[in-house]
Every structure is written in structure tokens, then in C-alpha cells.
Amino acid sequence: MRPLSMLRIAALFTLTYSTIVTAEVSQQILESISIPNKVQTSIGTLEFFDGVPNDTTINKLYDNLDRMRAVEVYLNNHGAGSLNAMRKGNASIGADASNKVTITEQLLKPESLYLTGNTSTLYALTYLDLKSEGALVVELPPGMLGFLDDAWFRFIDNLGVIGPDKGKGGKYLLLPPDYNGVVPKGYFIVKLPTYNNLMFLRGSIAHGLAPAVKNIKSKLKIYPLTKADNPPATEFINFSGNSYSTIVTRDISFFEDLNELVQIEPIDAIGAEMRGQLAAIGIVKGKPFKPDARMKKLLNEAATLGNATARAITYQPRIGGVFIYPDTNSAWTTAYANKNTSFEANGTINQDARPLFYFNATGVTPAMATSHPGAGSDYALAYLDANKKAFDGSKTYKLHLPPNVPINNFWAITLYDTQTRSLLQTNQPFPTVGSQNKGIKKNADGSYDIYFAPKAPKGKEGNWLQTIPGKSWFTILRMYGPLQPWIDKTWRPSEIELLK
């Protein structure tokens, strides 16, 4: 046998080495795309036979999938759930038709559970039902500040001072999604994409509460277009001090209510992706929603997880545009991340910004996120103290507002319950102090110190907000007619410091 040439030896060596390397690479690829017969995960041990899940594992995985999808539905549809909860809550006190308007004749009081409502503004709200009543006429009084939101709590149009009537009042015609009749002249026309809608109005109390109430009750009229020749009377229901809830639930009823809404609204009220999420948990337009015992358990768990997740997003947001003073370790935040009221930018919905707002607040209009020196209002929220710790109702805290608070109208700071996100219920009739309070005292330099404690520090009663031992709280600083130093952040409130 002839000896191998050096060239052939090199070729054989290269071939053998290449085969070994290829085998090693193939093994690495195989391991990266395969799954072991037993895997430990956060949902428990998953078992397979050469990649085939056994029955127990399949059940675990489907439970996890259904639960995950339901959590996403809870978070992504929280606006719809919140508006529906408000509608049902107000119906419980008699406001069960479009022409039955709830109004805070003595301002909002803590007995009524409303997400971060304030005590400084006259509210008038109604839930418009264009499904059963058809096109609606709204005769709007002068001097109103308001807006329309649809069934998913999305902004539709402004009314009043920032609307087409420019604060002069006038007649609006609200058309349902399927309206194909004649559109008469002489109205401000608004075409709505859903049948259920919120009309939210504020009345200025600069000249007193009584005349503001009279302006609304004597001039606001709502009636079907078909009854324009002989309109029925508009009714007003005073809910100041009424004990009832408008807050989204933390159980399966959230999904049941959402299903009722889906059955009423047009199929294109939401997009295919959102409809797919709903369908994945059994909510399909035109079909009954009948979760079995297993699914009911998962939906209850999902509501709890969704609620808890919204709280995590609230107290430790991980998205940009939430902190008002991001260059420091400040706890002051804004309700709208990046001042964006649609939660969409560059064709993308911000999945955390949406529940950040809807879990804690209601009423969407770009006007709430646009600052013009001396006009409108702006808000700063403090969920945590200066050390980024939860507020403790048994302890004493202090907020310092430097001299020359930059407002054209007034400022107010209000306390809220961390469980309900509604006004904190204490022995004080209104959990609010501000520049309109008669008993509030300025420091010698024109600054203010506000105290939060179970009992008022001696001599500070007019600058004190009561807290409750055993409960937490959070606060909102509202600036009415904010001036340029607030807008450009050259004036800013202190952090809320723990004293003892």
C-alpha cells in the first residue's frame, strides 16, 4: 500500500475536524431548540416525553395562557371597565337615562367613591345611551368646560370653553355609530363611534357655587332628536354626600360587565387585536359568555393580578415620562405619561401608560395635559414620600410650597385612599387644603407648609390634612391657571418629608 501524501493527510484531518465541529454545533443547536423532559418554571414543574407535554403539563400551560390573556384584557380594557362602573354606579342612584344628570350641588364629598375626583369643582355628568335613545340633542349652557368620551374612555370631542361653542353655549347633536338619517342644520355635530358615552361637564365656581349650579340646572337640556318638538324635561340628581361606588371591581364581574358592553357596541368599536384578546377568554360579540368553573377561577385570579399589576405600575413606574422632575429622585408624577392622552406614539400603544391613567383617574381630554400660562389646570401626584416609601397614616409629614406659588386662580392639595383611589374619608368634611381655604396661614416669606397627620400639629390646624392610622394615602396638588414658573419647572414643591 502506497504511503499517504502529505496533501491527502491534511485533507482527511480537515474533514474529520470539520465533522466533529459540525456535530458539536448541531448538538448546541439541538439543545437550544429542544426542551428537557422535566423543566422547573414559575408555574410549577413541566414534564415531557421527548418534547411532548403530558396531560398535567398541558393543563398547567393552558391555565397559564388563559390567565395571562385575562390579565391583559383587564389591563387593556380598564378604561371601558371604569366608564361602565361609573355608569352602573350612577344608575344605582337613579341616573339611568341620558337626560338624568348627576351633579355635585355641594361639591364632591368623600362618601361618593369616584377615582381621584376633586372638591374644588362643580361636576355634572351623564352617561349617554345612543343605542336606545338614538341621536341626542344637548343644549349646553354658557361657561361650561367639558368633553365627550366613548365607551372605552377614549377622547371624542371637547365642549364649552375649549369646544366649538367657545364657552358661549349652544346646541350639540350627538349621532350614534349607525345613524343614517337627515342631519339638521343649526347644531354642532359630533359623530360618536360607540353607543355608550360619557358627557363630563365642569362649572366654574369663581362667582360662587349657587349661581354655577343654577346655570347648569336651568339651562342644560338633553333629549332625543326625535322629541325635539316637545322635549322631555332634563332631571338632575344631586350626589354630594351620596354613599355609592363607581370603581371597577376586582373579580369576575369585571369580565361579565365587559361582555355586556361588547354585545351592545359595534364590532369595530375596537380593533381585531383587542377583539382577539377578548375572544381568547370567551367574550365574543353575538355569542353568550359562559365560562366554566375552571375559567371562572382563572378570571377571578386574573382580575386580582391585573389590579395588583396596575398598582405596581402606579407606585413604581418603569416607563419614561411619568416623573415630573426626572433629573432628581423626586416622587412627584403625572397621570399622563409624556402628557399623552391617547397613550399612542409612533404607531405604538404604551401598554403601561394606559393602565397607569385608567386605574387611578377618569375623563380623557387633551386639554387636561396641555398647559397654557394662566389658563386651565395642571396636576402633580405624590404616591410616595421623599424617601420613596409609602405614606403611613399614623405618622406626620410636611409639604413645603415655596413663596409665590405660580397660579392665576388657586391651588389645592387633596388626599386619597390608596385602596379606592377616591377621596380619603376622615373627620374633615373635605380632605383638601388650598389657597381658597380661609384658615390657611402663610409663612413670613409667603411660602406655605402643609401637614399630614392623624392630629393637627399645634397651631397648624388651618394647614393640616387628617390621615388615618393603619391606612396609607396619596395626594394630588392641583394648580388652577398655572403660570410659567410651574410650566418650566423653575418653581417646584418640596418632596413630602416624614417628620415623625
Image (tube, rainbow, N blue to C red):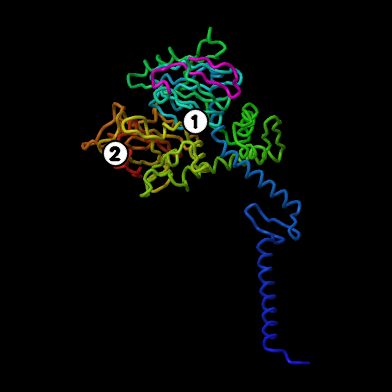
Would residue 62 appear left or right of 158 to someone viewing this image? right
Examine the image and state in which quarter residue 369 appears.
top left
**Which is the main secondary structure of the residues drawn in magenta?**
loop
> Which of the pair 474/83 is nearer the observer?
83
Is residue 198 rendered magenta in the image?
no
Helix, strand or loop status at disc 1: strand
Helix, strand or loop status at disc 2: helix
**Residue 103 circle label:** none
> Which of the pair 465/13 is nearer the observer?
13
Mark 1 vs mark 2, CA separation in Å: 29 Å
Identify residue type, mark 2: Pro
Q: Nearer the viewer, mark 1 or mark 2?
A: 1
Identify residue type, mark 1: Phe
Q: Which residue is depicted at the point 69% across and 49% down?
A: 61
The residue stretch that appears in magenta: 164-185
Q: In the rendered view, tell whether residue 174 sits above or below residue 47.
A: above
Residue named by callout 1: 155
* Quadrant into which the N terminus falls: bottom right
Residue named by callout 2: 485
In x, y percent, where is residue 391? 42, 42
